[in-house]
Image: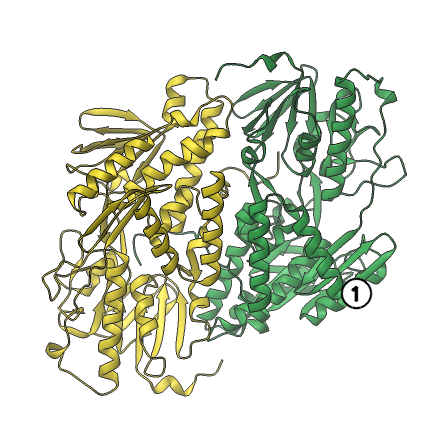
Chain colours: A yellow, B green
Amino acid sequence: MPSSPSAELPHIVVIGAGFGGLAFCQNFPAHLARITVIDRQNHHLFQPLLYQVATAGLSAVDIAQPIRALFGDRPNLSVIMAEVTALDLAGRRVVHARGELTYDYLIVAAGGRTSYFGHPEWEQFAPGLKTLDDALAIRRRILLSFERAETEPDPAKREAAMTIVLIGGGPTGVELAGTFAELTRTVLNRDFDHIDPSKARVILLEGSPRVLAAYPPDLSASAQRQLERLGVEVRTATRVESITEGRVVAGGQEIRADNIVWSAGVAAVSLARQLGAEEDRAGRVKVLPDLSVPGHPEVFAVGDLISLVDANGVTVPGVAQGAIQAGRHVARLLRRELRGERFAPSGREAFAYRDKGNMATIGRSSAVAEIGRLHFGGYPAWLAWLGVHLLFLIGFRNKLSVLLQWTYSYFTYRRGARVISGVEGPPAHSA
Amino acid sequence: MPSSPSAELPHIVVIGAGFGGLAFCQNFPAHLARITVIDRQNHHLFQPLLYQVATAGLSAVDIAQPIRALFGDRPNLSVIMAEVTALDLAGRRVVHARGELTYDYLIVAAGGRTSYFGHPEWEQFAPGLKTLDDALAIRRRILLSFERAETEPDPAKREAAMTIVLIGGGPTGVELAGTFAELTRTVLNRDFDHIDPSKARVILLEGSPRVLAAYPPDLSASAQRQLERLGVEVRTATRVESITEGRVVAGGQEIRADNIVWSAGVAAVSLARQLGAEEDRAGRVKVLPDLSVPGHPEVFAVGDLISLVDANGVTVPGVAQGAIQAGRHVARLLRRELRGERFAPSGREAFAYRDKGNMATIGRSSAVAEIGRLHFGGYPAWLAWLGVHLLFLIGFRNKLSVLLQWTYSYFTYRRGARVISGVEGPPAHSA
């Protein structure tokens, strides 16, 4: 295609099409600049529902939208699917796997990654949950281990195949534990003849004294009660000492489990280091109050890879809302600057995070929610959670499909997505 | 779980939960025997729509149903997910990856595999389409090659990345070619800035003089016209001479293409050989008129792995209807025998295939159909095809979800399923 007259416009490169990158693009006027979005995946992921894919409640496409489809009709915006390999801030260049880009403004919204707190060797035994492929791998592994249990004659091996350990009692760990407990007790339950999946053990390990440590204590207690009612063994103040193949040692005790999932730490992606700014312990970049990178007013960072105490003294949390609000803030700043209402960098408006509340679901009809001073649990919290997540789920088709699946699961207690694909082994040439 | 009193019942082992195996189980009374279904996958696949998954029109779970979910409530039926490794007909034993089973009756319904006509080395360059994983791999590969084309500066490489070659003009080849032409011209079309996907080449190679060689000649001609209208280059009477990485030589001409899909041959799975019966050239087992294996009245074979001219002199075709009708036939025979209306094997009723017609779809609103003496093409054929496939698609949820996706695609010309997952490369630790 011939290059358009818009080549004269300033060029903004956005790294990452997660909540932060997307919010920037959606809130920035199309005629003011050319935008190039670069991401290593071809889809935007609705990360808050990723645990539903891991637990076979939703299928992958329900929570993912092709990035190109999201921006198909928008002028002055291109998408590149490639991994960014290097940043050259001095030369205003982004180097990726298949070429390079120069920019006038750069938005780094590349997100977080799973952190193993200095134990990278644990990753192979306790995979994390960050991408669609992670979720599909966890699902495959757990469904296959119940298949193995069905024909396993050795009782100890059978028990290990039917044990799921979640490490980390934050929202992801709580949501996974609750949903796995439900999956085994109400869905898989009816599928097998030689094992009883409702006897499967789901163990949630948390190092600190309570689950959902970032929530108010009354909601932590409520979450733990709701989990235990579903059959989850919750062990708080229990630190993991070692993880090897099918084996976790925590609080001095050994647990044999074929399914170990890491839901504990988040750190910034390694790309963050190349911004050359000061970092916190998790590798998150200490940005200036306007979200720009020190020394580079033309470079901004948003989302899970920043560390910032905002204008109101609040630490911006690594949640979707934090990324979305930051993306919008940068869009507003650049819109003003490119319209000629220029400010000196020091005169730019500081970012202020607005806490809209927190919610975690625990299972069918169970959840905890905190909205302002309002704390609630159980069924009302679950309904609120359902509404909010459907409302924010990107894409009309997906909303309908997800609603359909949820309604169906709710009334029938069955799950449609528990199809195993990508089984390791030879191609399908023999039965 | 303790063994039930039903252990006294005769034991029927069914290898394969495709159309044939499923039809047997659904038509055999639950109280007459214990049934064990064994399959290497955990799902039944609605194979006629597999090309829709490969072309990003449907998602994997729309056309797959967990086998356990299909039989969850049925008594006297267990499911084992494992690969069958050996058959011992003399000892009435089935050996699988995690143990073995003995049987009183055996139904082998293990299906077909892709055949490369004596060129197994072509498989790595031109994958076939038999399983869900095959379909997902083809989709991933094609979507990724357009992503590569978008940033490829070399025009020859860019053209190769935008060329799709289908080898074999049977129903699968025709359906894939039509749908890929449509995908590039009406969907991907709007997604890219530097390439024009509507200029992508879709080439269908067929060795015989016409596509859909098993259909009446007027429908073959109609299909070719409809394909060409969509922009497919149809080359009949063109034999493939060699396939290497990104390169097909056919009819003396070389084609450079990053996407080569094999849609030509089907052969019986290798397990068929272990039945010890005479085989045809594709390795299909020559069964007796009652569908039993010569010398073993207690062993039956159904579906893609049999070769049979039926009671009316018709060759049973390797299509879903052939497998379904054969599965039902065996269910009827065994039901009678186990109820005590015993016949000598020679006195068993012979199988007679009832041709219910053939249909192949070519794209949005295009298809060809043959129902009895009625031949038709275009929109009416497409509507008929849509109705029949929705009717037969197993599972209420899937029907709704598929209908929703189709309606949505039809009116918006967009496709929801073009999410790439399972990209090779390092885990998501950097942007």
Residue at screen point 48% across, 70% down: B191
Residue B66 visible (yes or no): yes
Left-right relation of B130 to A26: right
Q: List x then y, in percent, for residue A150.
A: 48, 24
Q: Nearer the viewer, residue B275 or B319?
A: B319
Quickly name the residue at label 1.
B222
Q: Nearer the viewer, residue A39 or A27?
A: A27
Q: Nearer the viewer, residue A22 or A215?
A: A215
Q: List x then y, in percent, for residue A409.
A: 47, 43
Residue at screen point 81% across, 52% down: B214
Residue at screen point 20% across, 38% down: A221
Q: Nearer the viewer, residue B71 or A376?
A: A376
Indicate the amino acid at tag 1.
Ser
Left-right relation of A123 to B85: left
Q: Looking at the figure, which quarter contains the C terminus of chain B?
A: bottom left
Residue B284 visible (yes or no): no
Q: List x then y, in percent, for residue B149.
A: 49, 68
Label count reads 1
Reply above or below: B343 against B113.
above
Callout 1 secondary element: helix
